Image (tube, coloured by chain):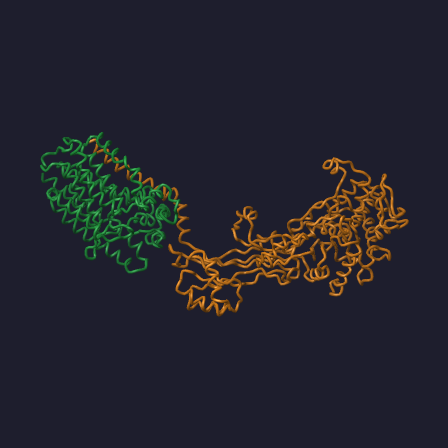
Chain colours: A orange, B green
Amino acid sequence: MIRVKVVIWSVGCLFVFLLFGLLNLEVIHGRRYQELGSKNCVKLIPQNGSRGKILDRDGFVIVDSQLAYDFMILPQETLQQDRIIENASKILGKSEKDLRFAFKSNFISSSVPVTIAKNIGIKEAIALDQMKVDFPAIIIQPNPLRHYPYGKLACHILGYVSEIDRWRLTKLEDYGYKTKDIVGFGGIEEKYDYYLRQEEGGTSFEVNHRGKIMRTLGFRPPVDGKDIQLTLNLKIQKIVEEKFSDKKGGVVIMDPYTGEILAMISSPGFRPATFAEKDNSTIAKYFNNLDAPLINRAISGTYPAGSVFKVIVATAALENKKINSNTTFVCQGQTMVGRSEFKCWSTHGPQNLGAAIAHSCNVFFYKTGLLVGPQPLHDYAVKFGLSKPTFIEVPYESAGFIPSPIWRKINKFKNWFDGDTANLSIGQGDVAVTPLQIARMMAVFANNGYLVNAYLVKSIDGRDMLKARRKPEKLNLKQDTIDQIGEGMRRVVADPAGTGGVISGLTVSVAGKSGTAQAPPGQPHAWFSGFFPYKNPKYVICVFIEHGGPGYYSSLLARQIIEQMINEGLI
Amino acid sequence: MRNSTYFILIVAILICILGLLSIYSSTYQKEGKIWQTIFERQILWIVLGILLFAIVSNISYRSFWDLTYIIYILAILFLTLVFLLGVTRLGAQRWLKIGWFNFQPSEFAKLALTIFLARYFSRKSSDDIELLSGKFGIFRGLVLPFLFLAIPMFLIIEQPDLGTGVILFLLFISILYLTNVKLKLIFIFLFVVSMPLPFMWHFLRDYQKDRLLVFLNPNIDPLGAGYTVIQSKIAIGSGGFFGKGWLSGTQSQLHFLPESHTDFIFATFSEEWGFLGSVGLLLLYFILIRRGFLIAQRTSDSFGKLLAYGISLLLAIQVGINVAMNMGFAPIVGIPLFLMSYGGSSVFVTFIALGILANIDKRRAVF
């Protein structure tokens, strides 16, 4: 009888075992299997919204998305394929062989639509769409493609769009980014990708084991990305790009009171459309080009400031009362600092501050700099926004650099000599600045002593960004200092011997400072930064030509730009 | 309730109804004429099965004592015929086409061997309640019955139908155990039988090897041999606690689950009825089998007793293997879940077996 009990208990145990198995599958792991189950039978045919537009300050479109159409076939309707391809080849004007080859090479599985032809025109799309009545396997998929009506214009500010890379994907996965997503690289496209990017919609279908569509489950409309309005003025931007043509360097034109960037270019540039079109050989050329066309020189390129830096030396000297308007140094073409000879680019004779700025006399500033001392020079440079990022809205900005005795001691284990102070006084040595920083520095003299922040974005999705902006910082400079330096800079242009004399004679009075930054082994960098009109300034300009020769060339370019702006009635 | 006839019949019909619901749900959407007739055919099999139950439950089970060898020889004959004339389906030659009915002799053989073993280990006289095996030596108690078993078992395994073969073997071991064959002998027997198992690996067919390997790890071949297990587990698991509801199972209706109306009907049912429904179904099977054991326990006649044990065990083993296989706990073998799965042979044989059970309980009063 024991054996009977054993057998009956064994059967009982068998059922308990099955019960626990069920409990494990359905209750404990139910959620996971439910997901697997719906993954089995729900398929999505996605439809993309279009990425947000980027506009200029007046609402003109700089970048938008245009619909391109992809022609696809659902492979499961095998009987129709041949006739579809036959008809499509007539409409598209491509040979049947090519279409068949495209079908074969793009085939993934029977449930995934196969792309036969990409980016077909709207006429062909409509013609093919009408064939749908006879051949339901045809799919015409609208596919928004980034469209650049002005080609290269403002390419560095905009950035480009391309398939997401691994580094960005790992960073952004948590925000709903997926592989093969199109995201922005560089510029506004990258920084504001979150706003610009569209939300994918699509139709979900229930499919059977062969991927055949059984019924439609639902449709989620795609959501377009939000538009971003920039502070750029398309007209000025166009003028600047046109005048700059194929030189290397960058130009920034800024509103001196708000810090809004009205134009910003970097050259050489690139065609952003190349990335949207996936023209791989041209893309490779961009990446391998030693002139680095993808770098935005206006914010990421750091260069010695040269004579443009002298306005900071002058400010520091006046504020620290080391000199006044009557202080005069005699330029004999060179001066001795310690045991070294420091040269001026000419022999200017006796120079006061105004004349020294106008003639960009090195000797005057060597001596002034030595009077002020290196640390105050550094501190004033930092006060003017150098050696730190401006926090403009586009990524990959460089901070630049201004040396100081302490930094030198700590990092280089070297002492600071008077020769270094002399070098710093004319913006050479370790000084590294970006064109944007110089424009921002110049704005202080245009707006009576406020350090503005640089802005590129005016509004996002119609919401004005004004409220989000920081107020310009008052630098607490004496009015007298600003006036004296301003006058000096006016003389740069107006004085017959001024270094920026080439700009004189325009209907608009310009004030500014040119610079010739030594950059061996090549030609020096050419700088010009200024503001205009001299009374009631409306624009701050900074023109920088990499290895462009003496400052004369950038001054000339500034003149051409300003002249054209006058001609177009922008001033 | 002293008489079990109605109890057994009602439970069996309840299971059949659940089976019919699942068969309908898994086939009603599928295209093709065959799918549409399956539901109606199953109703026909069940009605015929109930008729068979009514007939068999009124024939004295003692008459099977006399017919044992005839039944045994018939079973061997059918199994041999399968080899010669059988219909090959799904890679196995298991069916005999008789008119419009595909008869599966291995189903019949299960019952035939149960009857045979019950008779072999009991005495004709219903007065003598002692089991014979106490007096049997190693030859009569072990070797001879195994030889009798081995012939049909070999034929079935060669079909190939490893599952039914395994069921027969388990049944044989259980009956040996129940008939008081010495434990030592059983262990020696098991040892001897299991010795050549490692070598048997080479005699297995490729798909059987695949199934065993896939049982150990279904993910080695998710779209091939492992596909069914994975889909079956997904079907059961996605049912959750309350199930997706009748006619709403996606796994079975959209063809993801193969054999959703036959061997994997438990997964189909479980997907739509959830944990609650599945527990209910298992409970129905349990009380049916428990009733079988009760009948065996209260029958004094040794043949009737052993026959009832045999039938109950046969049912229990089938439920166990089929449900375990649905949940991925057992390798995939072609065993139907009786009364649920579509298939005439299984329905008929099950109803006959239940009829015999009912009759054993009925006859009890006679002696």
Q: Specify whether residue B152 is in view.
A: yes
In the image, residue A523 sits, relative to residue A17, either above or below, namely below
Please state the horizontal and vertical placement of residue A402, each as a whole percent of the image.
74, 43
A131 on left or right of A229: left
Point out the image quarter for the C terminus of chain A: bottom right
Query: Residue at image x 11%, y 46%?
Result: B59
Residue B49: percent from the left, percent from the top?
A: 19, 51
Pick the residue in front: B55 or A167: A167
Residue A179 higher or lower than A2, as above or below? below
Residue at figure coordinates x 25%, y 46% from the top left: B158
Location of residue A216 (image quadrant): bottom left
x then y, percent, for residue A353: 86, 49
Left or right: B166, with B126 as reference point: right
Which of the 4 image quarters holds residue A271? bottom right
Of residues A92 and A59, the one nearer the viewer is: A92
x, y percent for residue B79: 20, 48
Left or right relative to A264: residue A373: right
Could you say which is closer to the camera, residue A384 or residue A270? A270
Q: Quadrant of the N terminus of chain A?
A: top left
Q: Please say whether residue B286 is visible from this viewpoint.
A: no
